[in-house]
Image (cartoon, rainbow, N blue to C red):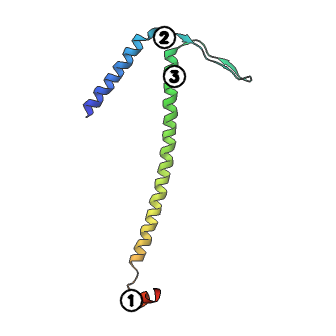
Amino acid sequence: MKNVKVILVILFLLLIVILAVQNYDALATPISFKVNLGFLNFETSQMPLSLIAIITFLVGVLASGLYGITERFRLKKQIKTFIKDVREKDKELSSLRNLPVTTEDMSSERSHEI
């Protein structure tokens, strides 16, 4: 199974290289971004489209990584509270198991309840 994953990754990378070579002219086209919000007027220098695609990909990886880290810490905290709750309930269950057993007749109590 490990070899299949490696082969699939290699084929995917090969596909990306083929697409990049075939579309080199489109990816090498220089473009600039403009931001005009009234209070902010900004324009980037000319950059190739491929560089913008790489930067966008890396920003997405960083954003999803930060989200994953925060989600992981939140879930760890939740697990700790669940473990604490389980320990408290186990302690309560142990105390209930250690109660003395009574020898009272339960049949007389049932007839009063009905």
Q: How far across and how far down the image is residue 20, in percent?
A: 41, 14
Name the side, left or right, on which 97 lies relative to 33. left
Q: Nearer the viewer, residue 22 or 74?
A: 22
Instruction: Give the mark nearer the N terminus: 2 vs 3.
Output: 2
SS class, disc 1: helix
SS class, disc 3: helix
Residue at left 50%, top 44%?
A: 71
Q: What is the distance, in whole Å, between disc 1 and disc 3 at their CAs? A: 78 Å
The picture quadrant where one finds residue 1 is: top left
Q: How far across and how far down the image is residue 29, in percent?
A: 52, 10
Q: What is the distance, in whole Å, between disc 1 and disc 2 at their CAs? A: 89 Å
Which residue matches tag 1? 107
Instruction: Give the mark nearer the N terminus: 1 vs 2.
Output: 2
Residue at left 38%, top 76%?
A: 97
Residue at left 29%, top 28%?
A: 6
Name the side, left or right, on which 9 lies relative to 110. left
Q: What is the distance, in whole Å, between disc 2 and disc 3 at their CAs? A: 17 Å
Which residue matches tag 2? 26
Q: Amino acid at mark 1?
A: Ser
Which residue matches tag 3? 55
Name the side, left or right, on which 53 lies relative to 13. right
Residue at left 36%, top 21%?
A: 13
